[in-house]
Amino acid sequence: MPETRVLLKHAEDPQLRTIAGYRGYGGYSALAKAYRKMEADEVLKELEDSGLRGRGGAGFSMGKKASFLPRGEMDKYLCCNADESEPGAFKDRELMQRNPHQLIEGIAIAALAAGAGQAFIFIRGEYDLQADILEAAVGEAYEAGYLGRDILGTHRDLELVVHRGAGAYICGEETALLDALEGKRGNPRLKPPFPAVQGLYGGPTLINNVETLSNVPGIIANGAQWFRGFGTEQSPGTKVVSISGGVRRPGNYEVELGVPTRELIYELAGGPQEGREVKAFFPGGSSSPVLTAEEGLDLPYSFEAMAAAGSMLGSGSIIIADDSVSIPHMALRTARFYHHESCGKCTPCREGTNWTVKMLERVVRGEATPMDLDIVTSVQENIIGHCLCVLGDSMAMPVAAMVKKFRAEFEQVMAAAGQPEMVEA
Amino acid sequence: MPDRAPAPIPELHEVDCPPELREHIETLMSRYPDRHSASIPALWAVQKRYGWCTPEGIRQAAAVMRVTPAYLESVASFYDLLHTQQVGTHRVAVCTNISCWMRGGDGLLEAFQAAAAGEDVFVTGFECLGACDIAPMASIDERYFGPLEEADAAIALEQLRSGADPLPHKALAARPLPGGADA
């Protein structure tokens, strides 16, 4: 199966990251079209018609989200969420590193649609190289008149600042991102109010993922129908899929949404290592409920198919667990991540992630009883839907799925760790 | 009770802030509608200058930003990359999250810890660094390298010691797309 490169087209050309290189491939023509020839409402309508769904995890319609911002003259903001930190996800890193101007152009067009005069790229602090590349590209875009005052002589303004985070997964949660950007600890806020109404500095704010915004120039340049020519009815467009774990060629591959998951894993990523088989996989980053090979390999890779299978496409990141991987140990690794990253603001997440880690440690040490597996499950049920943000759910969903689908293996691990009588009891 | 009052906003003349640092933080503040937004960038600037967020450096940034040192400390202590205790001249963060764990991240962390023993190098395990494609991987002085073998740890440490760029052939920056050039 070949890739369908739209966002990563020409990405192997190192000149693409310069403004001259990007313009050489037609870059910034969509910005010129939007700023010179289109009204904000027309841009918004094109985005809505395209059916572009957010690529950060939730999969919500980007155009619809932008339309939630109130009209009229006021201080509005656009934040590009470049805090990619979910285990398994590394697509935004690739897009920013190889094609920074595509993102900047997308931000400028989206800001026009939303009526935002100030934009920020909130990039995780670990992405030092990519932040340097973005800063250089933003500087070039200012110099060329694509950012700043009176863009291309249209009397429209946009300021864009690259803001580096400092190491906290929670800042990818949109309201935590806003707190971090306002200079505070990155704690999520209670919603509603949603950021579209009351976001950064209290003003209406549109928050979109890097890949979502990177899709915008193509849609404006070629039209919504062109975009709908890729993918499925409910999942239009291409997707940069990050594939990692037990495969021969881990990496980012851009495909049309809806392609067979099996081909993604076996053809593009080379399938499992010699002598290994796919046992299970996270279809959409570590927050998505794992699918067994039988459940998942023959599904189309789309938002709707993954949702129907009880999981999610999420950020579009596949982590393969081959048959050498111990699922209970993988569950513990997963839980430890969320425990470490829980901001501590709300109880179900703070305590739930803590208890889950402790119980899973007992499981792998052989100190647990089968009843403890029921308690682990019940703790997950008490986390889901009860937290300020989705971080708690993001641990509870995959952990609950692993315990449910691989219960026998949990029991075997407990037994093998030295207390078989407890398993038999 | 007076000595129990919270530390006030320090005056600039009390903190002896280097002029370049002050100017840098003021530039950062000017980028945002609200000066508080510059807190993380200002702490980055402090860390870059002093190697970590020293109490004195935090007081200097607080004086420039007109906030209390406690405010900046509360921010610094939230984030994994801002160090409120001294760290080494070089920093190595080894990812031990799911994809790196599957491909030997724990062993790689141990190899770096062993190679750096007694040296002025800060080695730490880290949650997902967003580079599962080059698992197992490490961030060395904020740049990514992988896939690494355990033997690379000693090589990287030797290169850092001699002032050379570590593991140039394993730098993420130089890596092609896995699918090659456009078909």
Image (tube, rainbow, N blue to C red):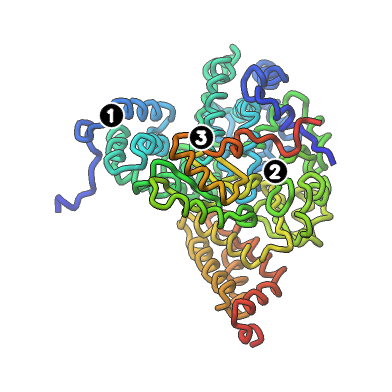
| Residue B18, numbered label | 1
Amino acid under disc 1: Pro
Q: Chain of mark 2?
A: A
Please state which amino acid type lies under the numbered disc 3: Asp
SS at circle 3? loop
Which quadrant would residue A361 be assigned to in this image?
A: bottom right
Given residues A49 and B10, the one toward you in this image is: B10
Q: Residue at x 77, y 59 (%)?
A: A276
> If you read the primary sequence from the N terminus, does the residue marked by circle 1 or circle 3 appear first?
1
Residue projecting furthest to the top: A153
Q: Are marks 1 and 3 in contact (CB under 8 Å)?
A: no
Q: Which residue is mark 3?
A: B165
Label 1: state its secondary structure. loop
Q: Give the answer, above or below, for where A18 lies relative to B125.
A: above
Regarding residue B76, the answer to whether it shows in the image is: no
What is the chain identity of the residue bearing mark 1? B
Q: Nearer the viewer, residue A201 or A265?
A: A265
- Residue A270 position in % (x across, y down): 78, 48
Relative to residue A4, is residue B44 drawn left or right? Answer: left
- Where's residue B7, x and y in %? 23, 45
Which label belongs to residue A251? 2
| Whole-number angstrom distance, CA of label 1 to CA of label 3 | 30 Å
Give percent across and percent down for residue A346.
48, 59
Give the label, 1 or 3, closer to the camera: 3
Amino acid identity at mark 2: Gly
Asked whether the residues under marks 1 and 3 belong to the same chain, the reply is yes
Q: Which secondary structure, mark 2?
A: strand
A84 to A224, vertically: above or below: below
